[in-house]
Amino acid sequence: MRRREKWIDPANWASLKPLGIGEGRPNNYREITKAIGDNRDQLGYAWRILREGTCDGCALGTKGIRDWTMREVHLCNVRLRLLRLNTMPAFYAATVADAGALGGMRSARLRELGRIPFPLIRRQGDPGFSRISWDEALDLAAGKLRDTNPDRFGAYLTSRGTPNENYFAAQKAIRALGGNSIDNAARICHSPSTFGLKEALGVAATTCSYSDWIGSDLIVFVGSNVANNQPVAMKYLYHAKKAGTRIVCINPYREPGMERYWVPSNIESAVFGTKITDRFFGINVGGDIGFLNGVAKHMIDNSWIDRNFVDHHTTGYADLVATLDGQSWEDLEATAGTSRAEMRALAEMLHHAETAVFVWSMGVTQHEHGEDNVRALINLGLTKGFVGRDKCGLMPIRGHSGVQGGAEMGAYSTVLPGGEPITAEAAAKFSDLWGFEVPSKPGLTATDMIDAAHRRELDVLISSGGNFLEVLPDPDYCHEALARIPLRIHIDICLSSQMLVDPAETVLVLPAQTRYEMVGGVTETSTERRIIFSPEIRGPRIEEAWPEYRIFGELAARTRPEIADAVRFDGTPALRRQIAAAVPLYAGIEKLNAFGDAVQYGGPHLCADWKFPTDDGRAHFSTVGLPDLSRPDGTFVVATRRGKQFNSMVQERRDALTGAEREAVLMNPDDADRLGVSDGDPIVLRSDAGTLSGRVLRAPIALGNLQVHWPEGEVLLDRSRRSPQARIPDYNAVVRVEQVEQVEQVEHGHR
């Protein structure tokens, strides 16, 4: 039965303070004022981008400042903060004449210098970059690629603002060059979700739509903080609450933004705020499997499952029961970091819910056992058939506007377009389609590329956006690896710190267009699988910037002139026609050509009516063992978190939602008392990989757990810890906490 929203609901008010005065919250109106100030030299262009473009921030998906979930304004702080990247002018050539002078700048300052104006080159021994023509740059790169074994080059694409057309052209170009070593940011974010969903359901994307949130009986967030990463989604939760939806959060840290939030575009919420979470379950970092398995065990033991769905539409249930029978409550509690009673509380909520949506993010995936985390979550969703029907779903929520399409376009070292695994048969199919031989063995993942570079086994790296120094564990190791690559080609709209790593031989920096500058428009794919057209926006241009699809196509065409016609495109409409031919799921993309055009592949629900595209037509339960989370006495487990930032793009020193500054170490008050430290006290975190200095911030976080900001916390991470299938790094570490006085005494004793 469809729930009706209440017009006003004081029971959901977060505070009687008008507009949340004095409360920890982002000042959304100040963000609008700041955006106006930052873009004052191009206000008309900035407004047209907002009004006519598809958001290049998170992956909720827009048509201008509207969306497909509700008839209200869709505009968030993330998009406003990113706006200047599209409107700022180019820097002067003299800016990069001395790379050493730029080396000490933070990434935010490098971005503020302006857009890259034209192709740049820096050779070994050069103090900085100098101008080079496009022809010279491309011919130099093609000559090196021609002499390089395909096993010794790779390409990486980031996801911020990258449209489907660029992904598709890039992967096609790399395969035309004889390799499969192309990867993108989806690897670092949700690749474990792809493995888990594909195995269990036969699909590799969210099964539902955002509209399913509103009116569902229950929404369960696991390791996901949409208040920080997808702030417009808080509007959806506001409406969900008014429709009677209950919201659960499972996380080591009780995120303040997920407890209550002031939605600026809704008068009631803007004035009184909105209570978001109805029930919070605190667990250990990495304790997801213990908790989720415990909840599933309660569901089974109490016969709270949907027997009709399980018996007629799933397989593997008996194995799941046997596995859970073999896991004692003591082991489940120890792994989860919470009690059997807490697990039962969520099981009871699921028992009474007819509909539920499970939402998860990198708190689930970025672990050494990320794939099993996802499997345990899917198991729980399948116990009552919370998939393939209205107000239900399994949703790995995406953080970047371009990330969903990255793997689906085939910009992935382990799959071809459409997510097809790389096999001899699949390679032959695409060879016939494209007219050149497609290699049939998987390529290097992003992390594998850095390892190969460190071993001096990578001769060419093409990096389109991104910054390995700020994304992967162990920045010093990444720096050494980049410095050993004979030719690095960086394609971007502005400078990044990885461009400034001294060249082993040659570094090329090539200026790219933004999505709003590309003639013929482009498309992105949102979290809910909606392929959205974003038109070219009239405004100023960086004269020598090229669309990335053209750059990759020219690199391949000049390296292999005999197949030039197969890798050059006369515009984005031609690319969309090729995408439709190569990826059947994307049928209809070739018809998108105007503002507001969109198509949701698979419809509102994948696996609708419990029809699963698996070999046997059924959903598959998995058997998931408990991970070994043991650690030495006296140590803590630390997770890396985001705060007032977009990916690694830090926008403020202080996170308004948490009150935490960049050096904060979030710590349970009881742990702080035991250590004898107070708020603001300096401490040092020491792992086997490195050390990080910080300051204590008492916070509602599980005992024995800490959180620090990322990318600052990368120095603590063990680069060798990666998940077995997705090869995603583990962004958590075991550390000892030392007070500064203790550190100084030890160091003094060694002098």
Image (cartoon, grey):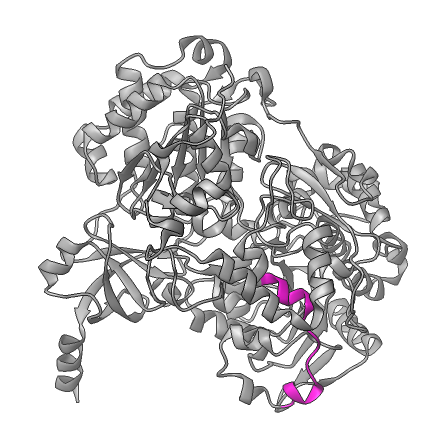
Residue beneath the point at 54% across and 88% down: 100
Q: Is residue 7 left or right of residue 568?
A: left
> To which quarter of the image does residue 557 belong?
bottom right
Q: Tell me residue 437's x, y (percent).
A: 79, 48
- Does 700 sit above or below residue 389? below
Determine if residue 34 is in view. Answer: yes
Q: Is residue 704 left or right of residue 145?
A: left
Q: Is residue 571 left or right of residue 487?
A: right
Q: Per the image, is 94 magenta? A: yes
Tell which of 163 and 54 is nearer to you.
54
Q: Tell me residue 65's x, y (percent).
A: 65, 48
Q: Tell me residue 87's x, y (percent).
A: 69, 68
Task: Give the quarter of the figure containing the C terminus.
Answer: bottom left
Tell which of 88 and 583 is nearer to you.
88
Q: Tell me residue 310's x, y (percent).
A: 44, 13
Q: Is residue 332 left or right of residue 597?
A: left
Residue beneath the point at 78% across and 54% down: 176
> To which quarter of the image does residue 416 belong?
top right
Counting the numbered discs, the total is 0
- Does 611 sit above or below residue 339? above
> To which quarter of the image does residue 398 belong?
top right
- Does 14 sit above or below residue 45? above
Tell which of 489 and 347 is nearer to you.
347
The main secondary structure of the magenta stretch is helix
Residue beneath the point at 27% across and 64% down: 687
- Does 739 sit above or below residue 429? below
Q: Per the image, is 88 magenta? A: yes
* Range drawn in magenta: 82-97
